[in-house]
Amino acid sequence: MKITTIILAAGKGTRMRSELPKVLHKIANRPLLQHVYDMSRHLENNRIKIVIGHGAELVTETLKELDASWIEQKQQLGTGHAVQQVSDQIADDDTVLILYGDVPLLKLATVQQLLKNVNSQSLALLTVNLENPTGYGRIVRDATGKVTKIVEQKDASDSEKLITEGNTGILAVHGDKLKQWLNRLGNNNAQGEYYLTDVIEMAVADGINIITSQAETEDEVLGVNNRLQLSHLERVYQQQQALELMEQGVTLIDPARFDLRGTIEQLGQDIEIDINVILEGKNSIGNNVRIGANTQIKNAIIGDNVEILANCIIEDAVIGDNSRIGPFARLRPESVLANDVHIGNFVEIKKSTVAQGSKINHLSYIGDTTVGSKVNIGAGTITCNYDGVNKFRTIIEDGAFIGSDTQLVAPVTVGKNATIGAGSTITRDCPENQLTLSRVKQFSLSGWQRPVKQEK
Ligand code: UD1
Ligand code: CA
């Protein structure tokens, strides 16, 4: 079977009240249209065609990586008119699948079921049974239960409005048939639009069976028209992901307070994630990892037995096995920590490597630095890596001990097993194995008196 998937995405989305075209609004930090595309990419032998209109330029620019052809519908004259724009690109022997750029949670299994129902004698239609079908096209059936047509809400009679089976708009049909029907669409209806739904009645007249199927849940076929619906589908999507992770053996202390806005490419065993953790981008998490509350992680590679305590922000970083991070630590891009590293509270690391067993436990800034193994960096240590124009590197060799409140003015090297006395401002390289101090010598003045306030 050769499939042409047509994704309709030309609508404005007035009710979003946004400058951004509707299909670029995001669920889990991925545009709605991208969700639909990613799902349909899993269909074999499939060409994807996307009909765009409002904000067409921004849509194609934002999603230029997609392997799809873009078709512009200059005026939005209805769903039938939208599909007509692709007519000349549909081969007779194609199976045409119609999807919507603002219906992001449709599942592959549902589409595969739909595609099983299509052949030269049948059109496959996805319908949904709704408690409140207001706004939907209604599926009209005859006495034997056969679908005869779809009637839009605005064209429906009072009795048709009582029908609770709604049209999702999602359908599959052979190309030759669809093209004939598209040619015959009119716009003589309440909205003056070319309705795609009118092809159903034409199909029936041509002796084609309409075979309906349903999605597992209503959420799968819900479209986004406003921000409330967007937030609803975000929650649904997050719940699905949370469920999948728990099935894969992750403990989520509260699945309702966990957000994955990206992927976990490698997932270890016995991971425990506390509340309000946000994972973004591409991540990998090893075995026995614990992630504390209110932590944000983006593009991180986390080894085994790592403990990330509460309130950390981690981005583009690598954390080695048995390391402990936080609470309140920030690992900025290009932070690479080896095994057994401790990064404590109010410590910021940027573009630095920290070798095995080193500790930076309190209140420090380490930027553009190479830290050796078994180094101990005292509280309040700052690498002064920036002169306002240029950035310079600091090198701290194995076994060094940096006393508290030290400023390391880069470029500078602290030698192997060197010790730096607390409160030093280091501007020159520190030799191996020696104590280096730059602190003013302490002295005391005897007989010195504090100024005294004069009584008036
Ligand atoms: C459509 C269906 C209705 C169904 C409902 C499900 C028709 C005539 N009606 O109604 O039976 O119950 O969807 O949500 O098909 N679009 C374009 N170009 C256009 C018009 C629409 O690309 O000229 C796109 C929109 O961006 C949107 C989708 O098609 O993604 C549906 O359009 P919309 O106007 O929302 O259709 P409904 O009136 O809701
Ligand atoms: Ca709609």
Image: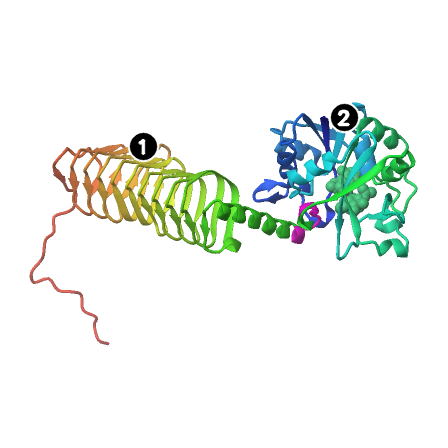
Residue type, label 2: Asp
Residue toward you, 45 or 226: 45
Q: Indicate yes or no whether the magenta region holds residue 228.
A: yes
Which residue lies under the disc numbered 1? Answer: 392
Residue toward you, 407 or 230: 230
Q: Indicate yes or no whether the magenta region holds residue 454.
A: no
Considering the image in quadrants, where does the N terminus appear? top right
Residue 322, horizontal then vertical, whole percent:
31, 43
Which residue lies under the disc numbered 2? Answer: 94
Residue toward you, 372 or 432: 372
Q: Residue furthest left?
A: 446
Q: Residue furthest bottom?
A: 456
Secondary structure state at the residue bearing disc 1: loop
Residue stretch rendered in magenta on the structure: 220-229
Dot 2 beta carbon under 8 Å from ligand 1? no
Residue 259, horizontal then vertical, whole percent:
51, 48
Is residue 112 rendered to the left or right of residue 268?
Answer: right
Considering the image in quadrants, where does the C terminus appear? bottom left
Residue 337, horizontal then vertical, whole percent:
32, 38
- Quadrant hosting residue 431: top left
Query: Depth-wise, is mark 1 or mark 2 nearer the camera?
Result: 2
Q: Vertically, is 132 above or below 306?
A: below
Res 204 visible = yes
Is residue 244 rendered to the left or right of residue 441?
Answer: right
